[in-house]
Every structure is written in structure tokens, then in C-alpha cells.
Amino acid sequence: MKNQIRFSILVIAFILSTVSSFSQNKQEQPSLEGKNVIFVYGGWQGHKPTESVDVFVPKLKEKGANVKVFNSLEVYTDQNLMAETDLIIQAWTMGKITNEEFKGLQTAVMNGTGFAGWHGGTGDAFRDNFNFQFMVGGQFVSHPGGKIDFTVDIVDSDDYITKDINDFELKQTEQYYMLIDPNIKVLAISEFNRERYVKEGQPENKVTGSIVPMVWKKNFGKGRIFYSSIGHNLTDFDVTEVLKIQMRGFEWAAQGKHQQPENTISPVYGYLKNSNLN
């Protein structure tokens, strides 16, 4: 009898362990299936925000997302829509956002709605709103050299977003130089390794040797933030690695209301605390 009880306990433990393992594996694979996504576009037209709708909306729908498209920031004031949204994708360069619009956006993200984007559509929006920049985790300040060739180096090969992706090259596009939150979880970087970064009619930007984050993620309240500075040209997304990173970033950011939060705090200067350099 005791052996039967012992055997039953072992069977139950095995089943629970299997179910737990399955649940963990399931959580490790973010998905857009059934997620409510809004795509907001507008602002400066140099980054082709209107055209970006045709690039990404079909891909989001292929992943099973329920997508609504808006070309006005006023959508951020719709409390009911924001409350039911899993992910906001913004392609809006420069421009201004009203206090009411930003409050609606910020509240939604704090409550678990994800926020994601690329290049200037998120990293160069609303230059006079520092709270927005704080939420995103960085802000564009320059693209030394204009359109150039450069390498993107993956620095976290274990993260879902960049797993199994190798370093890659980009051709004739902008290498963003950014001011960044030192606590973001950096997934990819790029080194400014040209001898000189000069644009005609402008003084030289002496940034050779600098290394700047290209792709990162962070938490903001209960919401997840994903950003990639790649994408000045929409043809950048023809590069397999670029598109894969962007879509995975969308998938990850959409999970704020559905999965446990990750620890994304990664202080780049933390090593100095116990070093001989301070």
C-alpha cells in the first residue's frame, strides 16, 4: 500500500513538473496571436511613416494580431481603446504630443500595454517631451556621416529577441548616435569605427571609437518597451536579421499583460562600484 502511495506521488510530481515545464517554455515564446495592436503613424514624412503601414501591418496580421491603424495621436486619449490594447507601435518622427495625449499613452503603458518602434518613429519623436524620452529609454541626437555602411553586433545571444542571430552588415543607412538610459537591457550595439564622420557644410563629429546601443528593451511600469534604432530606409527591413529582431521585439513587448515581468535593469557602470577605477 505504501509503495502504491509512493508511486502515485511520484506520478503526480512528474505530471506537475511536466506541466510547469510546458508553461515555462510557452511563456518563453511570446506571440502576437490574438493580441490587440494599434499602429500609430505620422509626423515627418522623411521616414516614410505612411509606407511603413504597408510594410508591417500585413506581417502583424499574419502573426494573428488584431490590428487597428491610426494617423492621429488623439487615439492615445481613448481610454477604453488603450485599456484593451496589448501593444502600441509608433512610427511618428518629431512633431508634438499634447499633455492629454501623452498622459493617455503613459497611463496605458504603466498599466501593461507594450510600446515599440524603430529609428526616428520612436527614438526621435516629440523632442520637447523628456518624459516620453525617459519612457523609451533613449533619444536620437545625430547620425554622423549621413548614410553609411556599418556593422551591428549582437551582445545578448540568449534573449528571445536576438537568439540565434549573428552580427550583420547594413548598407547606406543611418547609424544613430543616441543619448540612452544607462539601465536599459542592451541587445545589440554598433561601433563608430570610421576614421572621420564628416557631413558637407558641418563640423566633424569626433565620435570615432564610440560604441552606441542599437537595440534594447526595458520595463516602464507594467508595460514593456522595445526599440531598435535601425530603419531609416524601409528597405533596411529587407535584411533578414533586422526584420526578425523587429518582429520579435513586437512579440515580446505585447506580453506585459500576459506574462511575468522580466528583470531588464542592466546598469552599464555597475562594474565600477567594486573596481579600482572609482
Image (cartoon, rainbow, N blue to C red):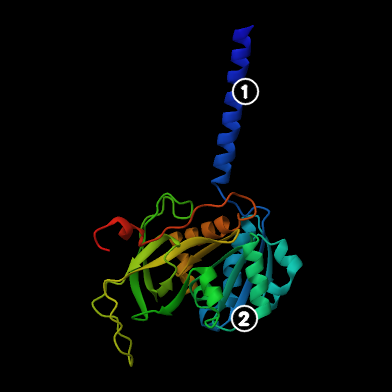
Query: Residue 226: x, y in percent?
Result: 52, 63
Q: In which quarter of the image is residue 4?
A: top right
Which residue is depicted at the point 44% across and 68% down?
Answer: 181
Q: Name the residue located 58 percent from the left edge and 49 percent from the top edge.
A: 260
Between the residue at mark 1 and the residue at mark 2, the CA separation in whole angstroms equals: 55 Å
* Three-letter amino acid code at the position of disc 1: Ile
In the image, residue 41 above or below residue 89: below
100 versus 240 height, above or below: below
Dot 1 or dot 2, earlier in sequence:
1
Label 1 belongs to which residue?
Answer: 12
Q: Is residue 21 visible?
A: yes
Residue at image coords 64%, 51%: 258
> In terms of image quadrants, where is residue 144?
bottom left
The image quadrant that residue 98 belongs to is bottom right
Q: Where is residue 83 in the image (x, y as percent from the top left)?
A: 72, 63
Q: Do the residues labelled 1 and 2 touch (CB within 8 Å)?
A: no
- Three-letter code, disc 2: Ile
Q: Nearer the viewer, residue 38 or 241?
A: 38
Is residue 39 at least partly visible in the picture?
A: no
Q: Is mark 2 on a helix, strand or loop?
A: loop
* Left or right: where 143 falls relative to 17: left
Is label 1 in a helix, a strand or a loop? helix
The x and y percentages for residue 223 are 60, 60
Front-most of 52 and 18? 18
The image's mark for residue 97 is 2
Q: Is 112 on the left-hand or right-hand side of 262?
A: right
Residue, far top: 1
Q: In which quarter of the image is the N terminus?
A: top right
Q: Quadrant of the C terminus?
A: bottom left
As drawn, the residue found furthest toward the right would be: 80
Outermost residue on the bottom side: it is 201
